[in-house]
Amino acid sequence: MKHGRVALLLLSVLSTLLPDPAIAQDAASKQAVNMSGNIMFNNSHAPGMILAVVRGDEVYLYGYGETARGNGKEPDGRSIFRLASISKVFTAQLYADMAAEGKVGLMDRLDS
């Protein structure tokens, strides 16, 4: 019986010293996202990029490159980028999502 208590005590102590599997998995996920972001940025030929990942209530921001060519300033959560024509894609996606949820109809007028 004494050996069982010692083993249980040792297991309890070891479990406090070992990393939490959820934390290790989270770190691996962040590293995978950052690596994917690097690949996307390097293939984009853009001067800079911000990748935002939303997971529950948590938001992770990753900045790559520069806010403008040659300025050396890495983008962050306060950086402003010109979106140009990509805003049309965002708008269409949001509208399609709202239509799928029954909040709007695809033939509804937008000015009313």
Image (cartoon, rainbow, N blue to C red):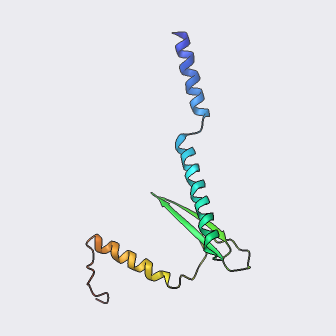
> Which quarter of the rendered picture does the C terminus lie within?
bottom left
Q: Quadrant of residue 35?
A: bottom right
Q: Identify whether 76 is placed above or below 106.
A: above
The residue positioned 54% from the left and 46% from the top of the image is: 25
Q: Position of residue 54 (x, y in %)?
A: 48, 61
Q: Identify whether 110 is placed above or below 46.
A: below
Q: Residue furthest front?
A: 43
Res. 76 visible in picture: no
Q: Position of residue 28 (x, y in %)?
A: 58, 49
Q: Position of residue 57 (x, y in %)?
A: 46, 58
Q: Nearer the viewer, residue 51 or 40?
A: 40
Q: Position of residue 96 (x, y in %)?
A: 34, 75
Res. 10 visible in picture: yes
Q: Residue furthest top?
A: 1
The residue positioned 63% from the left and 77% from the top of the image is: 46
The residue positioned 54% from the left and 10% from the top of the image is: 2
Q: Nearer the viewer, residue 34 or 15?
A: 34
Q: Identify whether 101 is placed above or below 27.
A: below
The residue positioned 74% from the left and 79% from the top of the image is: 70
Q: Total marks drawn?
A: 0
